[in-house]
Image (cartoon, helix red, strand yellow):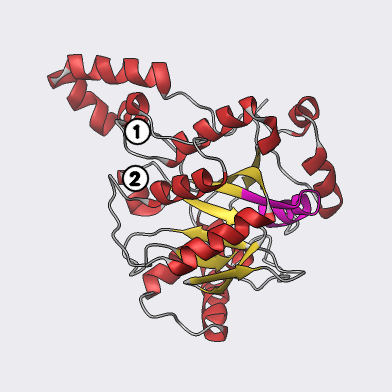
Amino acid sequence: MLRLEITALLLLLGASQIALADGALLVEQPYGEFGQITPTGHAAIYLSGVCAESPTRLRRCEPGEGGVVLTRNAGVSYDWVAMPAAAYLYAVEDGGRPPAETDRATVNGLRAAYRRSHPTEAGLSDRNWQELLGVAYERRAYAFQFATRPEQDEALIARLNSSENKAHFSLFFHNCADFARWVVDFYYRGAVRRSLTADSGITTPKQLARSLVRYGNKHPEAQVREILIPQIPGAFPRSRPIHGVFESILKSKKYLVPLAIFHPAITASLAASYLSGGRFNIEKRALVATGPAEIPVLAELGASDREQHASPGNQ
């Protein structure tokens, strides 16, 4: 049974005790009906040194606080929303204990209790809150961690707090991954980018992870490492694997078969583009914490040691 200690929140917090600060690109698996249509998933940003004064205003964290998740979601009146990391992942307060296994009633109760203790921000509907509270009950995610500096956090806080925060979401040109790309680029210019060969130029979560890992391989000072955030079992169906744009077409029979019959040349072109630029195993080097005592050890592991702690089946 999954223990409550086996959470990326604790792993991220444990790692942040070693570095001055840390950030992470969160790449979340698709789920539900919308996830069947667009299996590219969701992207968000975790920052250990930044906290949420409100869903639309940032500040530096106080000792003991667990950082923030910044996310852009469709249907929200704001361009970005900030949620405490513990609330975003598990619908609990900082220091709270999420259940190791749960059901829908428990998850709904956790979300309702959190909302009662935090006045609802204008522009956030019931559906928005479902996507902003307890994400780890709905789907598996991967945190691609990178080192940050306090002065960078300060600059980001000033930039976002002083900018107009009004939604202009666009699935193709201004989506969740575009916002995550902008934040990572704020810390490491040029670290992440779109792909014409894998996604026809659309920014996708998987492509961001792929390019960030490549950047980390060339720039060890960024301290890029991947952490698995398990989906809490019991409440909801398991989420689905993350795909890029062309990969989604090639791995879906409902899209691939008609396309191959009526447009074989296009199908061959998509396959060639995917094979040349879209392949990336997002779980290959994911680390999984097995308890609080192992968190600092995992955070300090060298590349050779990480292979021994890789999640089962990913070696």
**Image side of residue 124 versus residue 11, left or right:** left
Question: Camera-side residue: 314 or 198?
Answer: 198
State which tag comes first along the sequence, 1 or 2.
2
Q: Position of residue 206 (x, y in %)?
A: 46, 37
Of labels 1 and 2, the one closer to you: 1
Closer to the camera in the image, 314 or 25: 25
Image quadrant assignment for residue 258? top left
Q: Is residue 138 visible?
A: yes
Query: For the point 45% across and 44% down, which residue is it?
Result: 181
On the rendered structure, is 37 left or right of 162? Answer: left
The spot of residue 232 in percent (x, y) is: 61, 56
Q: Does 210 sit above or below residue 275?
A: below
Q: Which residue is mark 1?
A: 248
For residue 162: magenta?
no
Label 1 crowd bin: few (<14), some (14–19), many (20+), radius 10 Å: some
* Above/below status of 309 relative to 231: above
Q: Which of the pair 1/201 is nearer the observer?
A: 201
Q: Is residue 233 visible?
A: no
Q: CA distance from mark 1 to mark 2?
A: 10 Å
Q: If the image is split into quadrants, where does the C terminus sit?
A: top right
| Mark 2: amino acid | Gln
Q: Is residue 293 left or right of residue 287?
A: right
Q: Quadrant of residue 274?
A: top left
Residue 76 in percent (x, y) is at: 35, 67
Q: With respect to residue 258, does 268 lie above or below?
A: above
Element under label 2? helix
Q: Residue at x 35, y 76 (%)?
A: 123
Image: magenta residue range: 6-23
Provide the residue designation for mark 2. Answer: 36
The image quadrant of residue 304 is top right
